[in-house]
């Protein structure tokens, strides 16, 4: 079993829908990252969380440390949100800032 | 502000040929540096990380090697490429130290095809 599991693996939504992507992990962590990878391959860091909730525009990320779970929400989704969303955690035992990555969730938003 | 560069952007190489991918970071000192690979249809895999000049940690056994000849330069190399080395190679950096604030920032990537 992977240390970081994301669900769903693939998601198709209509423009305007509310989207939720989930991430569960099995190790103690000091931080959790949500990343966005566009079709060309470039990766952008969306959020880094260690507790609670963060919001940036239409994106909201939450984390529950006790339940070892995080969610990424997209409100009023748009076709330009189509990308792969990757959850990554930094284990407490980590050295040098290493991350463990989930397999990613491929989101397609249709107009 | 900090920027991270990778080159080349794309590369097609024959099996058995050597490889050298370069990553440089500007606007910061003593960053942690990372090389990741993303094979087709798979998640990101950490290959190497470095916390300082000449300090390289390898995460997976393979025919690749990494070097950090300067503070903000990270090089990924191979003497003989294999077909299985094809993939998307990403370099990333994070601020020095191990604090929670060590967000990672990714370069644009190099798409390597080994034929």
Image: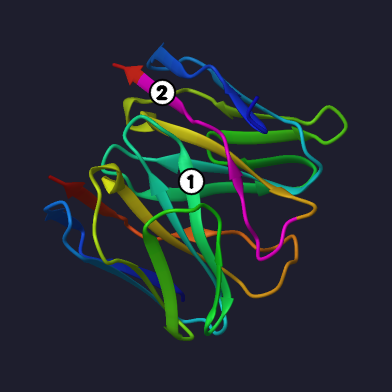
Q: Read off the residue under disc 1.
A: B45
Q: Say which element carries label 1.
A: strand
Q: Residue at x 61, y 72 (%)?
A: B95
Q: Nearer the viewer, residue A66 or A71?
A: A66
Instruction: State the SS at label 2.
Output: strand
Which circle, 2 or 1, is nearer the viewer? 1
Indicate the quadrant where residue B18 lies. bottom left
Q: Residue furthest bottom?
A: B70
Magenta highlight on residue A12: no
Q: Nearer the viewer, residue A111 or A41?
A: A41
Q: Which residues are drawn in magenta?
A: A94-108
Q: Position of residue B8 (x, y in %)?
A: 20, 64
**Res A93 quadrant in image:** bottom right
x 62%, y 34%: residue: A60
> Does A102 sit left or right of A64 as displayed?
left
What's the chain of the residue with tag 2? Answer: A
Q: Measured along the vertical axis of the image, is residue A59 above or below residue A7? A: below
The number of numbered discs placed on residues in the rendered structure image is: 2
Q: Position of residue B96 (x, y in %)?
A: 64, 75
Q: Chain of mark 1?
A: B
> Split into 4 quadrants, where in the image is the C terminus of chain A?
top left
Could you tell me residue A64's position as x and y percent? 81, 32
Tell me, for residue A7, which label it has, or none: none
Q: Is residue A37 above or below residue B17?
A: above
Instruction: Give the overall secondary structure of the magenta segment.
Output: loop
Question: Which residue, given by chain and number where applicable, does mark 2 sit on?
Answer: A107
Q: Quadrant of residue B25?
A: bottom left
Q: Which residue is nearer to you in this view: A18 or A10?
A: A10
Q: Is residue B20 left or right of residue B42?
A: left
- For image coordinates 67% across by 33% down, the residue present is A3
């Amino acid at each position: 079993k992977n240390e970081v599991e994301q669900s769903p693996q693939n998601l198709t939504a209509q423009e305007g829908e509310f989207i939720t992507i989930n991430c569960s992990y099995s190790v103690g962590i000091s931080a959790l990252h949500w990343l966005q990878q566009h079709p060309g391959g470039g990766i952008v860091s969306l959020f880094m969380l260690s507790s609670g909730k963060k919001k940036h525009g239409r994106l909201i990320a939450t984390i529950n440390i006790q339940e070892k779970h995080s969610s990424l929400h997209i409100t009023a989704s748009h076709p330009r949100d189509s990308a792969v969303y990757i959850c990554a955690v930094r284990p407490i035992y980590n050295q040098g800032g290493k991350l463990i990555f989930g397999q990613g969730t491929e989101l397609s938003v249709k107009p | 502000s900090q920027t991270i560069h990778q080159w080349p952007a794309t590369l097609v190489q024959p099996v058995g040929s050597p490889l050298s991918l370069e990553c440089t970071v500007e606007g910061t000192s003593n960053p942690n540096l990372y090389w990741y690979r993303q094979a087709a249809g798979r998640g990101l895999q950490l290959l190497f990380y470095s916390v300082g000049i000449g300090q390289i940690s390898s995460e997976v056994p393979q025919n690749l090697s990494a070097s950090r000849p300067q503070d903000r330069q990270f090089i990924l190399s191979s003497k003989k490429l294999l077909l299985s080395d094809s993939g998307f190679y990403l370099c990333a950096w994070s601020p020095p130290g191990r604090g929670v604030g060590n967000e990672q920032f990714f370069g644009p990537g190099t798409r390597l095809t080994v034929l």
